[in-house]
Image (cartoon, rainbow, N blue to C red):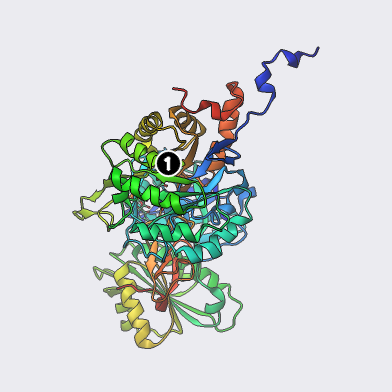
Amino acid sequence: MNTSNSLPEMSLQKPDMSVTIAGVTFKNPVLTASGTFGSGLEYAEFIDLGRLGGVVTKGVSNVPWPGNPTPRVTEVSAGMLNAIGLQNPGMEVFIERDLAFLKGVDTKVIVNVCGKSVEDYLDVVRRLQKEAVDMLEINVSCPNVKEGAIAFGQNPDALYDITCRIKKEAAQPVIMKLTPNVTDITQMARAAEAGGADAISLINTITGAKIDIEKRQFVLANKTGGLSGPAIKPVAVRMVWQAAQAVSIPVIGMGGIATAEDAIEFMMAGASAVAVGAMNFHDPYTTVRVAEGMEKWCASHGVDRVSSLTGIV
Amino acid sequence: MKKKTTMTVLDSRMLAQDIWSLELAYAPEDLPEKVCPGQFAGLYPAGGEMLLMRPISICRWDSGRGALRFVYRAAGKGTRSFTELRAGDKMDMLGILGNGYDLDELGGKHVLLLGGGIGVPPMLELAAALNRSEDAGTRVTAVMGYRNNELFLKEEMEEFADVYIATEDGSAGTRGNVLDAVRENELQADVLCACGPLPMLRAIKHYAQEKDIPAFLSLEERMACGVGVCLGCVAKTTRTDEHSKVHNARVCVEGPVFSADDVDLD
Ligand SMILES: Cc1cc2nc3c(=O)[nH]c(=O)nc-3n(C[C@H](O)[C@H](O)[C@H](O)COP(=O)(O)OP(=O)(O)OC[C@H]3O[C@@H](n4cnc5c(N)ncnc54)[C@H](O)[C@@H]3O)c2cc1C
Ligand SMILES: Cc1cc2nc3c(=O)[nH]c(=O)nc-3n(C[C@H](O)[C@H](O)[C@H](O)COP(=O)(O)O)c2cc1C
Ligand code: FES
């Protein structure tokens, strides 16, 4: 017998980092948060996209959207505010250019969908039926556009209704992305589940504002913007935990994730997978660092399947 | 290729009230393939509470020493924290970012550089690069606008260009802005390159239209990613932009240098 046999069994094997959500298996639980990663093309210069569990694209609408006036972004303590206003080139260009690029990448593809009316969302969902897309994430939670979007995410009846209608048309499993700008997140989580959602993701940004006291005016042209980054993490962990308690469908957790430890915290709160958002801007290598760090953490803590961490608190 | 790298501070010093010069050296394995005048880098404040890089233009590139020089105004929290750096300190940097000036387009011409305030620094690298141009007939004139007689980078610019000065308080050169100095000295050129505050760029765009000569303008916008993913930094364009399919181009990727005809500054 050699000495290595005296080590605990688990540390001899690589932990199983894969997670399965609605029948889709991701090689690891680390996704990109919509709007913070484009469609991956730009960050492919920094990281191997094949190391990611999945790429979640910027919101796509049926026609091109110009977005809001600038300034659209600003920094705040341990975070940032954005009011991009969902600028995007529309689904036809997205399919031709972005999806074509993602086809060559060995990772799962989740397309984030936005719209002003239910019909707008359905246009995109139908158009994507035959495309190489693994899942859809429906953004009913953007605080920065005047019509649609967040209105669906703040009213449980509207959320239930749009979820039902999207589920009828979607060829891929549907994730409903929830806003934290509500009084009771569990009500929204249940409405999405009742409408047939295959999973939910949260949190989108928290509405905030910043004033330039010298100029005596708001910094962002839109006045208010969505807060993201490490500043929101405790709120996000709390909401992921509450939502996960309320439903039996899988939860994808995000909000300020910077390290593997942050990601593990979200898993323990009830997330089956996690997404990295604003921290990509601080360090384009964050996603890969988080994925590698989670694997090391599992190995050093005797966790043989990362999925076993989900909801253990 | 763009990278986030850890740079070593070679030199940090004050040039004028709130204007600082910072020289950073690459580790040999991180050296960029190419640096163009007009490009910029993202400098990260240390500590962790400030997440976003500060976009600062390249003022000089010394390929022999692998050193980049920046000249910046200590404006807010992040740039003020940079003034505490000393030789030997480390600094994280995202670079090299953006599209600079097209040297092939400018070679062989009489180029008039217009730098206003903290728009002066990128003009220095542009003047230096044009000075190396092999196109016969390349000529560089620079007009630099300042608030007062703290004429930072003037002497260095004189190595590469005929220099004219404008000051707001009239303490040196022409009283007024860079265009006042252009008019007073009856300066002519084949092409304009400018960096400075928006009202100045707007005036230069009109001036170039009036004279019917091309102008290239370096724009500023608030940035988060610096690499084209967040769509925070857009400038209004006169035509539909190829990437966005709307009248918005990313200052951090398609810019910061734009042809004046392509951007809507009003
Ligand atoms: C392409 C480009 C090149 C630039 N080159 C130079 C240069 O060579 N020298 C120089 O002094 N300045 C330059 N600037 C402006 C410089 O980026 C800002 O002055 C700086 O980011 C302010 O940061 P702060 O920490 O002082 O302010 P803070 O108030 O702490 O900044 C808060 C946030 O707002 C952003 N911000 C604030 N003011 C500006 C601004 N005017 N432009 C863009 N972002 C801003 C910051 O980047 C940060 O994200 C350039 C800007 C751009 C876009
Ligand atoms: C610049 C920016 C753009 C965003 N765009 C979108 C979007 O298009 N669709 C969406 O569902 N969420 C969008 N979000 C929200 C993020 O996907 C994420 O839910 C949120 O930022 C919280 O995560 P973080 O703190 O890790 O950034 C955006 C966030 C940022 C910072
Ligand atoms: S700063 Fe993000 S797109 Fe330019």
B32 lies above or below A178: below
> How many marks can you see?
1
Q: Is residue B128 left or right of residue A229?
A: right
Q: Residue at x 32, y 68 (%)?
A: B198
Res B49 visible: no
Looking at the picture, how far across and down is residue B50, in whole percent? Answer: 38, 43
Q: Secondary structure at mark 1?
A: strand
Please identify the residue farthest to the front as the structure is shown: A168
Res B223 visible: yes
Q: Residue at x 45, y 35 (%)?
A: A249
Q: Is mark 1 within 8 Å of ligand 2?
A: yes
Please identify the residue farthest to the left as the structure is shown: A216
Please identify the residue farthest to the right as the structure is shown: A1
Question: Ligand 3 quadrant?
Answer: bottom left
Task: Return the chain for callout 1.
Answer: A
Q: Residue at x 28, y 35 (%)?
A: A184
Q: Amino acid at mark 1?
A: Ser
A239 or A298, which is in the foreground?
A239
The image quarter in which residue A175 lies: top left
Looking at the picture, how far across and down is residue B62, in whole percent? Answer: 57, 59
Looking at the picture, how far across and down is residue A158, in whole percent? Answer: 30, 48
Q: Residues within 10 Å of mark 1 (few under 14, many from 20)?
A: many
Q: Is residue A143 left or right of residue A284?
A: left
Q: Residue at x 60, y 47 (%)?
A: A107
Q: Read off the residue under disc 1.
A: A201
A154 lies above or below B168: above
A277 or A269, which is in the foreground?
A269
The N terminus of chain B, quarter of image: bottom right
A110 lies above or below B245: above
The image quarter in which residue B250 lies: bottom left
